[in-house]
Amino acid sequence: MRLELIALGNLAVSKSNMRHARKAPDVSDILPTVRARGVLQPVLVRPCAPPGEPLAAGAADPQAHARRDAQHYEIVAGSRRFHAACIIAAERQAASAQSGEPDPEIVLLPCAVLDDADDASAIEASLIENIARLDPDEVSRWACFTRLVKEGRSIAEIGATFGLPDLAVRRALALGNLLPRIREMYRQVEIDAATIRHLTLASKSQQKSWLMLVDDPDAYAPRGHQLKSWLMGGASISTGHALFDVAASGLATVSDLFAEDAYFAESEAFWPLQNAAIAERRAALIEAGWADAVVVAPDEHFHAWEYEKTAKRKGGRVYLDVRGNGEVVVHEGYLSRKEAARLAKGGNAGPEGEGEGVSGGGTGPMRAELTSLTQTYVDLHRHAAVRTELLGSPALALRLIAAHVIAGSALWRVRPERQAVKSDAVRQSLDESRAEAVFDARRREVLARLGLDAEDATVTASGYGYGAPGRNICGLLARLVPLPDAEVLDILALVMGETLAAGTPEIEALGTMLGLSMADWWEADDAFLEGLRDREVLLAMVAEVAGEQVASANARETGKTLKAIIRAHLAGEGGRTKQEGWVPRWMAFPPTAYTSRGGVGTVDAHARAMAQMSEPEEAAGETVAGESFSPGDDPVGVPMPSRVACDDSSAPDQLNARRAA
């Protein structure tokens, strides 16, 4: 390889260059640097025959007068630098023609000339030259930019030279206000970009205090948004959320040195001005013709799904949703779903608040019969009465629980176990297992009994119980009320099975309580055996299915051979006795490990389950109201209350007793 200065007219982009294309590449990022300093890094070229067509696709040849009899070269790496140089040469030529000056000299490009090589070598060189780079980190940029500023360069000049916006240059220079140790931590990726940005808000003393927390093994050093709250002494309010003129308010603000964010130094002084601005905004909206403008306080929430879009001319309101961080989100043109439904039926929806409505023949908006506060009063008292009466109807409560679990509600969120697995073989093994077949058959029966779609994947839905076809709470409750307790409990058992999380201590506790034998539900298959990798475990399994003598004789065999031995004994091949009911130790109840190394999830989960069940408050046989109950008691057969076709005449007496207690 040798270095040469080669005229642009004798260069063309090679088809082996990874950036070769009919369209010229984007060079906007490097053009300012090339215009200011020229091409500093040589391009990689190799000799070639003179082309019979234009030299660079998408770029004019500004050096058409270059010697045509000179050696020509094709660019293996450096296409963007070449096109940038062509653009600048064309600019200079146009400027000379406009001013009447002589044509500029031939532009020479620094090139590293490769020896003759095949296309594969050229492609490798192109790829290596483009990817084998390491961009400077931000701390290195800060050091270089700082030296340039000391040499008299302005931020604008630095940005123009390196093709960076002024904000990027200021962001790099802002790191100079941090302590050297913090800059080094950022260079070593010990702190992230969000943390470094918030640290630029800190004074030198705050930075030192934060480093003391970092060094203290018993203390917690806040990072990210927690660091911002720590620096601001609590909740931080951005100046961008203010509805008033921040400059005219006279409130003190703190800005990060990246010049991106600013915050109020005292949040207490912010809220009086913000509330006054909100009141002005509300008055302006009402004056603009909106039926009302409702201010939603920070301790309340505006949920879009509880409202419907409604035009201003139809009585739509504006909701000013005030957030705890000072932000005010304006929701224009909404009515509650109840009011929107009344409007759709031909009625009128009026603004929230008290007052007489317009007569039936009027065209103005009609006020609601109840204020929102009165409606809340009515709802809460009715809720208190219903749930207290429900204490006397445990059978109805049981059916209500089933409906909530199946459909979900605003306060219930139950999801089926997804049984997620990436392996197709494991997925197929599970789908074809006896346990899954029996469970799915029972699921189809329950779906049919509840009048749900028989093709549904689960009985348990993942929604919230409002509006889903066939899965709303009231509809399910109506279907569950006539069913006997035993059938309701069967449905709950299936739903509980669907929502039982896999790999948890609950599985271990239930398996032990049920006295479950995995041999009744599982047998070894290829998906299980192919997942085994540990030779020590495989030898132990050989000993279990074939005996210690066979295991000792094959102690030096490969894992593949050991798996073949296990398969043969489980299938009874080659005259071997078929091993029935073999279950590996991990899958039994209770599970055990094959080695002392640990790392067996079922064993760890079983240990946690046993520890939790041994706690005093979890002990079986608790005494409630003079009666003794234990986990083995069968609740089926509890008298059905007669009040809703499943109530009991003693329920009022039981309720009065509970009230008296």
Image (cartoon, grey):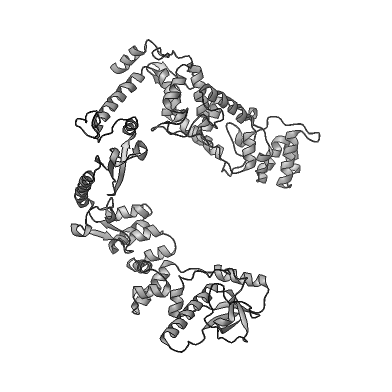
The quarter of the picture where the N terminus appears is bottom right
In the current view of this chain or complex, which residue is farthest to the right? 575
The quarter of the picture where the C terminus appears is top left
On screen, residue 249 above or below 519: below
**Side (left or right) of 621 relative to 568:** left
On screen, residue 475 above or below 225: above
**Side (left or right) of 402 relative to 563:** left
Residue 612 visible within the image: yes
Where is residue 325 shown, x and y percent of the image? 29, 49
| Residue at horizontal 65 percent and vertical 42 percent from the top | 537
Where is residue 404 shown, x and y percent of the image? 43, 28
Where is residue 12 shown, x and y percent of the image? 59, 77
In the current view of this chain or complex, which residue is farthest to the top? 649
**Side (left or right) of 279 relative to 174:** left
On screen, residue 540 above or below 63: above
Residue 301 visible within the image: no
Image quadrant assignment for residue 184: bottom left
Image quadrant assignment for residue 657: top left
Residue in the foreground of this view, choosing between 389 and 18:
18
In the current view of this chain or complex, which residue is farthest to the front? 361
**Side (left or right) of 15 relative to 656:** right
Where is residue 559 shown, x and y percent of the image? 70, 46
